Amino acid sequence: MINADVIAKSNDTASEKLNADYTALGEHLDRRGIDIAAIKSKVASYGVAVPSWGVGTGGTRFARFPAAGEPRDIFDKLSDCGLIHQLTRATPSVSLHIPWDAQPAADLNSKAEEVGLSFDAMNSNTFQDQPDQAHSYKFGSLAHTDAATRQQAVDHNIACIELGAQLGSKALTIWVGDGSNFPGQTNFTRQFERYLDAAKQVYNALPDDWTLLTEHKMYEPAFYSTVVQDWGTNLLIAQQMGDKAKCLVDLGHHAPNVNIEMIVARLTQFGKLGGFHFNDSKYGDDDLDTGSIDPYRLFLVFNELVDAETNPDFNPTHMLDQSHNVTDPIESLMVSATEVQRAYAQALLVDRTALAGFQDENDALMATTTLKHGFRTDVEPILAMARLENGGAIDPVAAYRASGYRARVGSERPAVSGAGGGIV
Amino acid sequence: MINADVIAKSNDTASEKLNADYTALGEHLDRRGIDIAAIKSKVASYGVAVPSWGVGTGGTRFARFPAAGEPRDIFDKLSDCGLIHQLTRATPSVSLHIPWDAQPAADLNSKAEEVGLSFDAMNSNTFQDQPDQAHSYKFGSLAHTDAATRQQAVDHNIACIELGAQLGSKALTIWVGDGSNFPGQTNFTRQFERYLDAAKQVYNALPDDWTLLTEHKMYEPAFYSTVVQDWGTNLLIAQQMGDKAKCLVDLGHHAPNVNIEMIVARLTQFGKLGGFHFNDSKYGDDDLDTGSIDPYRLFLVFNELVDAETNPDFNPTHMLDQSHNVTDPIESLMVSATEVQRAYAQALLVDRTALAGFQDENDALMATTTLKHGFRTDVEPILAMARLENGGAIDPVAAYRASGYRARVGSERPAVSGAGGGIV
Amino acid sequence: MINADVIAKSNDTASEKLNADYTALGEHLDRRGIDIAAIKSKVASYGVAVPSWGVGTGGTRFARFPAAGEPRDIFDKLSDCGLIHQLTRATPSVSLHIPWDAQPAADLNSKAEEVGLSFDAMNSNTFQDQPDQAHSYKFGSLAHTDAATRQQAVDHNIACIELGAQLGSKALTIWVGDGSNFPGQTNFTRQFERYLDAAKQVYNALPDDWTLLTEHKMYEPAFYSTVVQDWGTNLLIAQQMGDKAKCLVDLGHHAPNVNIEMIVARLTQFGKLGGFHFNDSKYGDDDLDTGSIDPYRLFLVFNELVDAETNPDFNPTHMLDQSHNVTDPIESLMVSATEVQRAYAQALLVDRTALAGFQDENDALMATTTLKHGFRTDVEPILAMARLENGGAIDPVAAYRASGYRARVGSERPAVSGAGGGIV
Amino acid sequence: MINADVIAKSNDTASEKLNADYTALGEHLDRRGIDIAAIKSKVASYGVAVPSWGVGTGGTRFARFPAAGEPRDIFDKLSDCGLIHQLTRATPSVSLHIPWDAQPAADLNSKAEEVGLSFDAMNSNTFQDQPDQAHSYKFGSLAHTDAATRQQAVDHNIACIELGAQLGSKALTIWVGDGSNFPGQTNFTRQFERYLDAAKQVYNALPDDWTLLTEHKMYEPAFYSTVVQDWGTNLLIAQQMGDKAKCLVDLGHHAPNVNIEMIVARLTQFGKLGGFHFNDSKYGDDDLDTGSIDPYRLFLVFNELVDAETNPDFNPTHMLDQSHNVTDPIESLMVSATEVQRAYAQALLVDRTALAGFQDENDALMATTTLKHGFRTDVEPILAMARLENGGAIDPVAAYRASGYRARVGSERPAVSGAGGGIV
């Protein structure tokens, strides 16, 4: 965390321009019949979770190039996450990944309190082998052909729930890499039966106020078939499990060209949208920074979410899930949290009454123009003012760079080697 | 239809080689513990439906280049389809498209009997406007914002059922182009609600022994969103409708890279696989000849179907659905029917006991080798012998060319102009 | 064309808000060190060509749903195009398509003068058969196996040049559909040799101050292979032809996920970027309205173009090329011309000195933030003010709708039937 | 390497069936006018190189699951590669990867001689950092913004040439991961200028009888842009370098749906096809076993190669390049080498005179049928007989499993931990 003076000083230099921009935007929105304060208020109360593993440098199967000050453990990670929230006021919670972050609950709670964060969904890991593990996940976990291996994966998920219950978490997110690399390697139907059976055991261990989030992904690490390959299979899982089971949508886990916002609408319509992993992608599960490649697509997703907000039971979780290979992870997460807020604010600006009218009349041109009017409005002054009023930084990256935080932790935390690369 | 002498003469020239090839294959399969006669028997009783519209030359939005002897009406089409079955003994039924093929039931039945065919699923058309139509489908049909337009589409589907009931058909296939070309043009959720409501009316009009087949497609003619865009939405439709509703899978209607055989497995597992439109594709809904681009994918689909055959209730419809832009449609349909049979025969050769064993042991290499052993076996002698013994041609294309059929109908049926092209 | 009073009245209602927005934007840009007047001036002098065929309703192979007032001929089309330029002041030229628009040069020049337009690149058509044509293009044109068919296609292209020369055009754009639908249908190498030989004959007929623009496309109407399938082949063509030959990039003609802005950069670097066909796409060559699906991609293309503007010899042609299936084509073209200008204006705002610095330092986060700063600025007031000062409409769609133009031409021009659909 | 007795014993059990199958196939081919001995002879003299890194277990960014007996160093790798060739007689050479395999030339030559292998192309590595390296490749290598980093990468490539020259290698393959993860992170043009400049230095260091092979790849490890992203850029590189520079095609490095066989044809036509990395893929650069996903595509590539064989100067290198994540790498490489031979043999069976005739007549159906006739012939007896006669195993996998080799090296080579995963 950084000194409040650094933030204040950074804000001092930027506030004059912000005030002018905010005033001008307020007047402009007023001419459109929109109250800027109401938008700002919604933005200010919006938060997106940060994944604990996101503050470390990511990599590919070819290599990982770590930077200085890599977090050594979950406590370092929580410090980094706390700083992100301190500057952006947009990331009030952290999502843990077990066993990477497995520590005594009291220690985790204590550290979280110290850095002003709460705990979002728990994440289990059955796609890697751990040193002390009896059975390997090389050929699967929840859907493995071997019953003991499945049980090991079930038990691990239940342990995640138990730890999460002590941390105030209310959801378990399951993503598995189970699948196959060759036609014929696995029988699709029997593999899915095994998955459903094992997942049901995890589901049955959920506390009443918890949600089970299952995540689909087209491919990787399996390259011919993946057991939960798309939203169709994910929907079947949620249906088979029960009311506490919902689908999690990661923006990078779809086939090329797929209309993701439509999947969001379908899952919402049938009460099965559980949450998001936000990121962006150009080719596959690239895990690039949210909004960095196709910001309009992100806006179209938020257009669906704002549409659904009128339903009081609609409350999907929002999390960033990115791999920061060439940037400072703290900077990327701050900017990405802001991009999520930006899409939300833009979607709030859409004149939904007018839009519905154009839709009813099949006036495609005016309907899409109405949508884009929200998107092309520069809402940065709203986001910045919400941050400022919440005690954050007008320009989080500038404040962060001015703080010298990275250099400081770089001196405290030992350098790590590149490693990485399962290749080639 | 052509003279039996032509077929006999064609078979005469080819039978010696066939006998030699068939004997050698029988001996080879015997060494693998497979009875060639059992395979031949299954192939001989397998049939795939031909679409009535498939015997006309297809085109693109840019142009259509008709050949000589284009069928003038459904009676010409039935003649062409009858010939296909005469030579291949693999296409015993025809699927009608209404209103293109709308004629008195008695006339259709009479002609079908004459050419030795029965009627497969009925196909409705609400993606084009007809001259006498009250409401346009420009902005949709079953999911249109206007109630009267939806009702018109519902009524048309019910009329298709009524005609089909007089023809012995047992299924209605619905494919609609409803969707949008612009973000915001349509509200995804309300559009799908309208679709479900209208489809339910059609469903309620189904006779007890009929099946409603709904067909998904990623895009085209709508280019931003399509109301039944993938198998997830298709599954929801089938679930909402009831037991008589099932999903139809067209091999060309998926996103790039999608694992189609896995979708087949999922729908089968949950009792919702209703049938197929076979074709092949390299880029989109190219409607190329079945097996012409990726024959192994076709085999992998049949691998799932043979797996599911053990369930006596499993009985999906099989139809070719292709656009013949540069070939004689009769030739393409004959070859494609053969390709479907080929994939079926190859899938029958797979040693499923061995395969299951390798799968249980995660012996990916031997599992996939076992599958491929079926695929790489040249089963042409089995297909040809089944045709020959059923009264068809060993080499249907050669017999067809020898018959002079195309030249004959070319002189009887007036030439038509290219037209086509909605472009550009 | 519409009465100036209509425009004036429309502008009257909108000018107060525009002035306020423009002033506020000017002050904001001033705080960023940017002179709004300089940007406006560049935007005001920017123009994009309109394709003559774009003012008719487009369609797909399934259907075409025409609207009222479809242009009957090139003279009606020029009227519609003139109106688009009257209201937007952004589309000063029209691109003709031969033989659709073939008329005496004097008549075309006279009409163009009347509506205030000039002529952009000529487009030949060898992907459709014309009634009086000796040889069919069913199996190709410039690359056909038959020499006489190739010669016919060459002659047609030369005729296009000759007509264009009388119209003040300076470029011929060639797009052919030659390819194949089946593996083996064509020998790739011999087909390309034939293409090169025929194209060379056309090239040799070019006046000295003309450019030959060849256009690549991944697929459609050919669905297995296309002779000019990508920019690699297109580059080879331009290299083989000579200095007057350059590549034309249509934004919708690429494989999924391809980085188009990078292709733009490569062709620019090697002096072979000849021009653009602007549109947008989600799945294939959807020909959707420019900027309607992925506006950031359009911006990234213009980012390359603004980068290259410093080279005085860099002067690619810009044209809209879209299919308007569900909107009034005049409205879509007006909005799309504006979207092209918007991307240009946003790209002009990028601080290129700062960007280059961040690139040199591998500060990926600040580099991309710098780029996005341009993109997220709402430049609408600049575009509107440029239109207003040039005599156009602040809100072209509103002015157009107020004018009653469509109803008027709807009464003058006879209704046409849907037709279309090469299907299915 | 394994004992000859093991092979002999394995062959004994299989030879009777093989003889019967081979005789039957010979008779069948004779009926088609093809001399089986001539095909067998070509297959027997065909070889594909094995990559040294291919005998280790591969992984993904998520995890790597090693098996027993992982090779400890290049000498273990050469033993494994020798065994592959011993059993298949199809992989006479190995391609080294530096610095992974950097050892004194004398030691490498001695070991290669011992195991009966020669050295194929050398591969440099500038996509990972090595412990002793002065400059990091995090932001690029040959195209880095920093001159010293570029020089380091150039020097490394020259060192690879120097080592290779002592090993009898005749080619250097360069693949770099240089690119960007964010729009704006890099200037495409300047980055490519730097690449060309650095590559030219490497080119200038090539011995006269060497070839420089550059390899393109659409994405990964860079996820927004890659400096050598496709064959268009690769062609420009080869053109800029000179006659000794050619393009290397990896089957998994293309955009979705791309027609790879056409790229092979184009590069061949212009004298720039340098070689292949064979593998298969369903989604991206999956590095799956050759022919395991789409065997017809592999055949179509070989169809082009057989077409080009008539040119005596045509001599591209052939190498397997796969990641074996779930199989024993030795088994996968043996099967894949066989799959490459299979595609070659099938392509040799195509009646090219008939094919050319059908192509000239635009008889698409018979042309594609002619091609497929080659593909659907089961050539396994030819491959097996060629292996047998060359001293290899009829069934390499069975012989390998019977040999106990994996268990033996598993006891000699220490177990390694999973590690891997740059994630997440």
Image (cartoon, coloured by chain):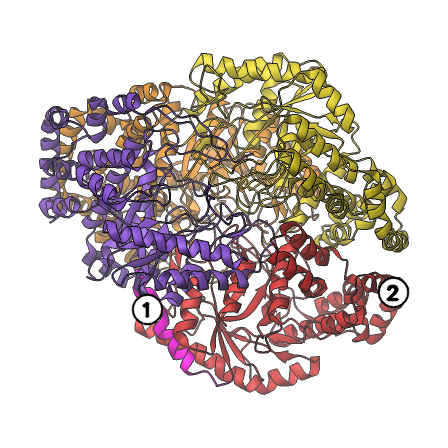
Chain colours: A orange, B yellow, C purple, D red
Q: Quadrant of residue D121?
A: bottom right
Q: Is residue C404 left or right of residue C277?
A: left
Q: Is residue D143 left or right of residue B365?
A: left
Q: Find the magenta span and give its range.
A: D185-209
The amino acid type found where label 1 is placed reads Glu
The chain that hosts pointer 2 is D
Q: Position of residue A50 (x, y in %)?
A: 39, 41
Q: What amino acid type is highlighted by mark number 2?
A: Thr
Horizontal arrangement in the rendering, residue C9 relative to residue A235 (left or right): left
Instruction: Please tell me how crowded label 2 is: few (under 14), some (14-19), or many (20+) other residues with Cα within 10 Å.
Output: some
Q: CA distance from mark 2 to mark 1?
A: 59 Å
Q: Is residue D188 magenta?
A: yes
The front one of C419 and B373 is C419
Q: Chain of mark 1?
A: D
Q: Name the mark on residue D193.
A: 1
| Rendering coords of residue B283 (x, y %) | 53, 46
Identify whether D34 is placed above or below C37: below
The quadrant in which the C terminus of chain C is found is top right
SS at badge 1: helix
Query: Where residue D23 is drawn, which disc sits there?
Result: 2
